[in-house]
C-alpha cells in the first residue's frame, strides 16, 4: 500500500512518518506543490492530507485532483474543530476526516478501514527480472528457481527500491524510510546492504550516482 502524506508541521510529520512506515510504504510532501511533483512520478493508494498547509490548502488541492479525475481515497487531518471544513471535505470527495489531536492507533484504524473499503491489497510477489522475483510477505527472493532469504533491512530496502523505480534516491531518504531515528546507520552500513542486494539481483539493477544517491531500474 503506497501512501502519500502531506503535513507541514515538522514534529508531527516525523511522528506520522515513523508510524505509517512501520506498516506501509509512505512518501512525504510539505505542501501541495510537492504533492503534485510526486504525483508526476508515481501513483498512490491513499492520500493523507492536512488541510491548513502553506500555500494551496489541502481542500483546494483535493478539488484540483478530483477535477483531473484522480479518485485516490483521501483522509484529511486537521486542527479545525467546526463542521464547516468537515462538510466541505466530504463534498470535495474526501473519504475520511480526523481531528487533531488524535492517537496514532486511531489513524491506523482509519487507514485499515479505507484499505478494506477500497479493497487495497499489497502486491506480495514482485518481478525483478525474467528469472528473479521477490516475495514481500516472506522476504524471499526466488532466483532461477532457488529461494534466497533476505534479512529484514535488506528486504525493506529492496521493497523501497522497487516501489520507487527509476527515481533518484538519496542516502538520506533511504535511511529515513528504512531505519528508525534511534538506530540511524552509517553510510558504510547502507552501502553494505546495497552491495548484498546487488550480489543477488545483479549489479546493474542499482546504479550509484556518486554524491547524489541511487537509482533502481
Image: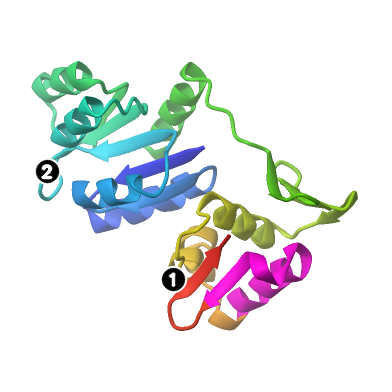
Q: In the rendered view of the protein, which quadrant contains the C terminus?
A: bottom right
Kindly state the secondary structure of the residue where label 1 is placed: helix
- Residue at 63% x, 57% y is 158
Query: Residue 56's mark?
Result: 2
Return the residue at label 1: 172
Vertical comparison of 12 with 65: above or below? below
Classify mark 1: residues with Cα within 10 Å, few (<14), some (14-19) or many (20+): few
Q: Is residue 87 left or right of residue 97?
A: left
Q: Is residue 95 above or below residue 196?
A: above
How many numbered discs sit on the rendered protein? 2
Assess whether residue 148 is covered by the magenta stretch: no
Q: Is residue 205 magenta?
A: yes
Magenta-tinted stretch: 189-208
Furthest residue to the front? 130
In the shown orientation, is residue 199 left or right of residue 57?
A: right
Q: Position of residue 55 (x, y in %)?
A: 10, 48
Q: Who's the residue at 53% across and 48% down the image? A: 22
What is the quadrant of residue 152 in the picture?
bottom right
Q: Residues within 10 Å of mark 2 (few under 14, many from 20)?
A: few
Q: Earlier in the sequence, mark 2 or mark 1?
A: 2
Q: Nearer the viewer, residue 145 or 117?
A: 145
Judge from the rendering whether residue 161 lies leftward or rightward of residue 143; answer left or right: left
Amino acid at each position: 500500500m503506497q501512501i502519500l502524506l502531506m503535513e507541514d508541521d515538522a514534529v508531527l510529520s516525523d511522528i506520522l512518518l515513523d508510524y505509517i512506515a512501520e506498516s506501509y510504504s509512505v512518501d512525504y510532501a510539505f505542501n501541495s506543490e510537492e504533492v503534485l511533483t510526486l504525483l508526476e512520478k508515481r501513483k498512490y493508494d491513499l492520500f493523507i492530507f492536512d488541510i491548513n498547509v502553506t500555500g494551496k490548502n489541502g481542500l483546494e488541492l483535493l478539488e484540483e485532483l478530483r477535477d483531473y479525475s484522480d479518485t485516490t481515497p483521501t483522509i484529511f487531518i486537521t486542527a479545525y474543530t467546526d463542521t464547516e471544513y468537515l462538510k466541505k471535505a466530504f463534498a470535495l470527495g474526501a473519504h475520511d476526516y480526523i481531528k487533531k489531536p488524535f492517537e496514532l492507533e486511531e489513524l491506523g484504524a482509519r487507514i485499515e478501514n479505507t484499505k478494506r473499503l477500497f479493497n487495497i491489497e499489497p502486491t506480495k510477489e514482485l518481478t525483478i527480472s525474467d528469472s528473479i522475483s521477490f516475495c514481500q510477505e516472506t522476504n524471499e527472493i526466488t532466483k532461477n528457481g532457488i529461494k534466497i532469504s533476505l534479512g529484514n533491512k535488506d528486504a525493506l530496502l529492496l521493497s523501497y527500491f522497487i516501489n520507487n523505480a527509476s527515481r533518484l534516491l538519496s542516502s538520506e531518504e533511504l535511511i529515513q524510510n528504512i531505519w528508525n531515528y534511534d538506530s540511524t546507520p552509517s553510510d558504510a552500513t547502507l552501502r553494505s546492504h546495497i552491495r548484498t542486494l546487488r550480489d543477488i539481483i545483479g549489479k546493474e539493477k542499482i546504479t550509484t550516482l556518486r554524491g547524489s544517491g541511487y537509482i533502481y531500474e
